Structure formats: C-alpha cells, structure tokens
Image: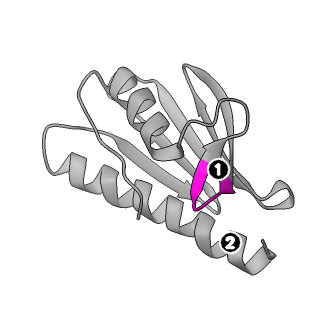
Amino acid sequence: MSDTEYLTRAEAVLAAVERTVDDANDGDHDIDLERNGSVLTLTFENGSKIIVNLQPPMKEVWIAAKAGGFHYRFIDGEWRDTRTGTEFFSALTEYATQQAGLPITFSTP
C-alpha cells in the first residue's frame, strides 16, 4: 500500500470514530473526544480513556485501551489486529462498550 493510500484509509478510520462518538453523544453517552493531529483521545465519564492513533511508518492504526495495546494493518479490505486478526471496529466496539458501561457500536466507514 502506498503512503497516500494508507493515509486516505487511516484518516477514514479516524473520521468514522469521530462520527460515531458524535452520534453517541446525541444519545445517552457522554464521551469527550479530542483530536491532536493523527491521535484521537476518547475520555469516558468514569475517567478511563481509549486512544486511537495512526502509525504511518508502519502503516498501522493503534488502539490503547484498558484491555491493552493493539496494532492493526489493512489486510484484505479491513483493518485487522496483527496478532489475533480481530477487525478494528468490532474490537473498538468491545473496548468502548466495556469502558463506557453502555453499548456503543463502531462500524466501517
């Protein structure tokens, strides 16, 4: 994947996360969202955080959550965990739901 293709796909991930948090905040959620360059920080009501950031040199998207740190590469049309193969948005849904204490569903842009 070229650098340009990586950035296009990875930025779409960040935009999808931002959109989902905005939509969730219109409902029952109260999630603080801060973007600093290619880093998104989601802060939940209980003070816990999830950080999603881009790693252009490795062409990866990373998640840091209470559950741990996870690296994702674009494989066969999806962002997949480099160790388990878990899809990015389903994993983020699980981590965010655990930390928020309410269901929140992230999906592919």
Sequence-wise, which precedes: disc 1 or disc 2? Answer: 2
In the image, residue 36 sits, relative to residue 66, either above or below, namely below
Q: Is residue 92 above or below residue 107?
A: above
Amino acid at the residue labelled 2: Leu
Numbered range of the magenta stretch: 74-79
Viewer-side residue, 90 vs 11? 90
The residue drawn where x is 56% and y is 36% is 86
- Work out whether residue 11 or residue 46 is closer to the camera in this orientation and state it: 11
Secondary element at tag 2: helix
- Number of numbered discs present? 2
Q: Position of residue 34 (x, y in %)?
A: 48, 51
The residue tagged 2 is: 7
In the picture provided, is 22 more to the left or to the right than 67? left
Please give the name of the residue rendered at 58% of the width and 62% of the height, measured from the top-left corner. 77
Which residue is the extreme one toward the bottom? Answer: 4
Please tell me in which quadrant of the rendered image residue 18 appears: bottom left
In the image, residue 75 lies in the stretch drawn in magenta: yes
How far apart marks 1 and 2 lie (CA) works out to 12 Å
- Which amino acid does the dot numbered 1 rest on? Asn
Disc 1 designates what residue? 53
Q: Is residue 44 above or below residue 21?
A: above
Q: Is residue 23 above or below residue 41?
A: below
Colouring scheme, one of rainbow, by chain, secondary structure, one colour: one colour
